[in-house]
Image: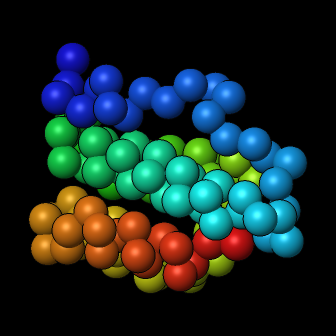
Amino acid sequence: MYDCAPQCALPADYFDVSITPFDPEFERQMELAEEGMKAYTTGIVRNHPFVDGKKRTAFMAAYVFLGSNGLRLVASEVEAVQFVTLLAASEIEESEFAAWLRANCQ
């Protein structure tokens, strides 16, 4: 299918949604969530799976992925659009996108 497909596929039990910010495992949970969201978003925006709508689809996949793993994106809609657009255009690296995610997830 796409080059990233095996790396993007994460098992359903990859995350423990019962972990809270006060749990010692919370930092590890955040790292795993960031990796998953980064993989899904980058895979969709850079592999052109659709004629139109890849940035919207990538953002929604990431948003749903976060929510299903007990996290939420707190960035403004404008800022989210800006960062997904920069990622799609390869104007920022995946690591920069991941840093933005870390700063904007709760």
| Viewer-side residue, 21 vs 58 | 21
Q: In which quarter of the image is residue 99?
A: bottom left
From the viewer's perspective, tell me whether residue 74 is left or right of residue 25. left
Residue at the (36%, 46%) spot, across then down: 39
Q: Which residue lies furthest to the front in this view?
A: 24
- Residue 73 on image: x %, y %: 62, 69
Colour scheme of the rendered structure: rainbow
| Viewer-side residue, 93 vs 47 | 93
Residue at the (32%, 32%) spot, across then down: 7
From the viewer's perspective, tell me whether residue 52 is left or right of residue 29. left
Quarter of the image containing the C terminus?
A: bottom right
Residue at the (57%, 78%) spot, across then down: 104
Q: In which quarter of the image is residue 15?
A: top right
- Residue 43 on image: x %, y %: 28, 42
Establish if 1 lies above or below 79: above
Quarter of the image containing the N terminus?
A: top left
- Residue 77 on image: x %, y %: 53, 76
| Viewer-side residue, 103 vs 73 | 103
Q: Can residue 46 be seen in this view?
A: yes
Q: Is residue 68 visible?
A: no
Q: Residue furthest left?
A: 90
Establish if 32 lies above or below 90: above
Residue at the (24%, 33%) spot, across then down: 4
- Residue 27 on image: x %, y %: 64, 66
| Viewer-side residue, 2 vs 7 | 7
From the viewer's perspective, tell me whether residue 27 is left or right of residue 48. right
